Image (cartoon, helix red, strand yellow):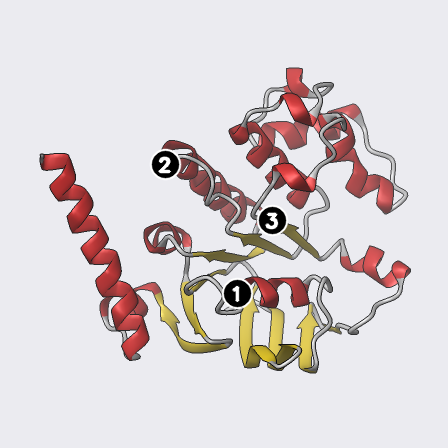
Amino acid sequence: MNNIVLKIDQLVKSYGEIVALKNVNLCLHGREVYGLIGESGCGKSTLAKCIMNLEIWDQGQIMLCDHILKKRPARNERKNLSRHRAMIFQDTKAGFDPMSSVRFVLAEPFMIQKEKVSERQLIDLMKRCELDESLLERKCATLSQGQMARLAIGRAIALSPDLVIADESIASLDVSLQAQMINLFKDLQEKYGFAFLMIGHDLDLIRFVADRIGVMKDGKIIEEGTVNEVFEHPVQKYTKELMASRLHTKERINDEKDH
């Protein structure tokens, strides 16, 4: 197994009296794809935000590439951390200024690092995320959903981070676009070797791309294992119910197609 990129120990996060994360432990290695599944409100997104220092946790420790994260990192430390981690949010369109150009969105990570970026680098980045270079001067407001999703991926991998987090980032796309984005994620992850934390509720998409899976319920990761272990031999009652629900949904869809 490759080096440890992300290690979370006994993480606790509360919102008032609501405990969103209850002693969460997670370990993610280089080149590994970890799928985190569970129903809405179980704590998946809160965990991702803590890893990105978008939420302040109460207790526990997060280690990213041998660096123990502070709850309130200074601006310069945040800048350095952005070389190691990136996140693709659920609503990709809301994450960008609609009047920003594609050029600016892709160049901004380099600008934050006070690095020059060449035209060749930007065009190469567009090719990597399957965007036509003719879109470079286009405003974000004029892009399609699929183009916006690709742009978000391009921005996330711009600085070659060690960890990429995708939080339900393709959930709003239609089925054909979801398949394209999953294949793009898979190709980029295999080519560039970043650790990939994929958060979602579509079990079949997660199954296709993940090496290991964690099942989250009420702020805890209650089951973890390889794709085969979790999908074919679930241990926890809740995991079994998730798998049964998935099979029931597929059967219902197939019945509707037959009629």
- Which residue reaches farthest left? 259
Q: Amino acid at mark 3?
A: Phe
Sequence-wise, which precedes: disc 2 or disc 1? 1
* Residue 89's disc number: 3
Residue at (53% x, 69% y) in the render: 43
* Residue 175's disc number: 2
Give percent across and percent down for residue 105: 74, 34
For disc 1, the marked residue is 44
* Secondary element type, mark 3: loop
**Residue 16 position (above or below residue 163):** below
Give percent across and percent down for residue 20: 57, 75
Q: Residues within 10 Å of mark 1 (few under 14, many from 20)?
A: many
Residue 101: name its quadrant.
top right
Q: Residues within 10 Å of mark 3 (few under 14, many from 20)?
A: many
| 33 relative to 124 in the view: left or right | left
Q: Amino acid at mark 2?
A: Val
Give percent across and percent down for residue 138: 70, 19
User: In the picture, which quadrant includes the C terminus?
Assistant: top left
